[in-house]
């Protein structure tokens, strides 16, 4: 099942076992019921972004165990870090933990991991997706906040929990 990553110019022909979009996660939201989430191997995740001079925490593809294949639709530079796995561009062996330049039509293949489990593929500027965990978490937080404020408006006994907050003047 092929997936086009949009403006990135990369066509994913096979995600392997699993390929998800991950950011650096959310800290300090546990009391609202949200897990920190984000990349499982922050060291490899951060290095993938650093190799491309991406902003801290920019979303990457988190590839579980390898088996990933993609074709460059445009000339693109990317970085692959994480678990040790064979990487080829048009069948020619390439190395991890560095930038890789692909020309339009080049096929990137990441074989199954020899050591470790999680591989990161970073693209210039990160991946902007409606499914980026930070965007999903932000929408969930908005929904949770609206539910709390709606409940407080309908139940005066809950209003003290809003004192000192932004909704103080709305209750």
Image (cartoon, helix red, strand yellow):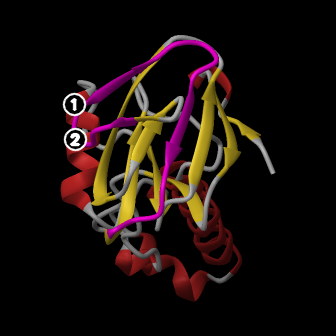
Q: Position of residue 7 (x, y in %)?
A: 62, 20
Residue sitting nearer the eye, 60 or 26: 60
- The spot of residue 22 in percent (x, y) is 46, 54
> Going by the image, does 116 lie left or right of 19?
left
Magenta residues span 93-114
x%, y% of residue 145? 56, 65
The location of residue 13, given as percent across then percent down, is 71, 43
Element under label 2?
Answer: loop
**At x 29% / y 59%, what residue is drawn?**
84
Q: Which residue is mark 1?
A: 51
Image quadrant containing the C terminus: bottom right
Residue at x 45% of width, y 56% of height: 62
**Alpha-carbon span between mark 2 and mark 1:** 8 Å
Vertical position of residue 109 compared to residue 160: above or below: above
Mark 2 nearby-residue class (10 Å; few <14, some 14–19, many ≥20): some
In which quadrant of the rendered view does residue 151 lie?
Answer: bottom right
Q: Residue at x 59, y 69 (%)?
A: 144
Residue displayed at 61% across by 37% down: 70
Residue at numbered disc 2: 97
Using a 10 Å C-alpha cutoff, classify the residue at mark 1 as few (fewer than 14 neighbours), some (14 to 19) or many (20 or more).
some
Which quadrant of the figure has residue 18?
bottom right
**Closer to us: 65 or 61:** 65
Residue furthest bottom in the image: 157
**Magenta span contains residue 101:** yes
Upstream in sequence: badge 2 or badge 1: 1
Secondary-structure class at tag 1: helix
Closer to the eye: label 2 or 1: 2
Q: Nearer the viewer, residue 130 or 113?
A: 113
- Left or right: residue 20 compared with residue 112: right
Q: Residue furthest front?
A: 92
């Amino acid at each position: 099942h092929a997936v086009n990553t949009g403006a990135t110019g990369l066509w994913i022909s096979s995600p392997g076992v699993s390929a998800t979009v991950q950011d650096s996660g959310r800290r300090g939201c546990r009391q609202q019921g949200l897990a920190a989430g984000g990349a499982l191997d922050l060291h490899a995740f951060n290095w993938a972004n650093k190799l491309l001079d991406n902003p801290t925490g920019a979303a990457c593809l988190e590839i579980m165990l390898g088996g990933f294949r993609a074709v460059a639709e445009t000339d693109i530079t990317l970085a692959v870090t994480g678990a040790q796995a064979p990487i080829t561009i048009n069948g020619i062996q390439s190395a991890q933990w560095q930038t890789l330049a692909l020309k339009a039509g080049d096929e990137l293949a990441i074989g199954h991991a020899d050591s470790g489990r999680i591989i990161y593929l970073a693209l210039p500027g990160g991946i902007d997706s409606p499914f980026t965990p930070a965007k999903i978490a932000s929408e969930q937080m908005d929904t949770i906040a609206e539910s709390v404020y709606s409940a407080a408006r309908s139940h005066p006994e809950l209003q003290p929990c809003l004192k000192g907050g932004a909704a103080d003047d709305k209750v």
